[in-house]
Image (cartoon, rainbow, N blue to C red):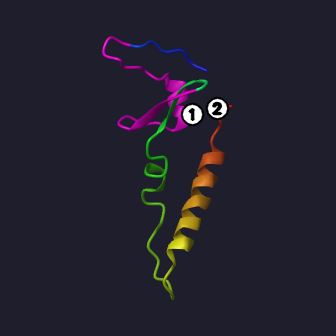
Amino acid sequence: MGICKLGSQGRVTIPKKIREQAGLRIGDELEIEITGHGLLLRPSHPFKRPFWGCLKHKRLSKPVSVEDMNAAIKRKYRERAFSKNSCS
């Protein structure tokens, strides 16, 4: 857990250790939501950056369905998400 302070223009600086654990980078967009437990902050596009360039072009003997592509993306996302240290 980290502590941060609300600045004069409503800005919050997320501690470096938490940014690194969450895989956040400068320019990433975050969503904020009020929940019954407080504020929830999460990446607005969690699937966007982790997959840039991960699907390399290969000449396949047959076309790949959208379902197969989605399954491959989910599989790769899970591999990357669970390979990092979790915040819990």
Q: Nearer the viewer, residue 44 or 72?
A: 44
Q: Is residue 53 magenta?
A: no
Q: Nearer the viewer, mark 2 or mark 1?
A: 2
Q: Which amino acid type is marked by label 2? A: Cys
Image disc number at residue 84: none
Q: Which amino acid type is marked by label 1? A: Gln
Q: Residue at x 59, y 66 (%)?
A: 71
Q: Which residue is mark 1?
A: 21
Kindly report the distance in space between the C-alpha atoms of the residues bearing marks 2 and 1: 7 Å
Q: Residue at x 66, y 47 (%)?
A: 82
Residue furthest out toward the bottom: 61
Q: Is residue 74 above or below residue 66?
A: above
Residue furthest out toward the front: 36
Q: Position of residue 49 (x, y in %)?
A: 43, 50
Q: Which residue is mark 2?
A: 87
Q: Earlier in the sequence, mark 2 or mark 1?
A: 1
Tell me whether the residue at label 2 lies in contact with that at label 1, contact meaning CB atoms closer than 8 angstroms.
Answer: yes
Q: Residue at x 54, y 15 (%)?
A: 3
Label 1 neighbour load within 10 Å: few <14, some 14-19, many 20+ = few
Residue furthest out toward the right: 88
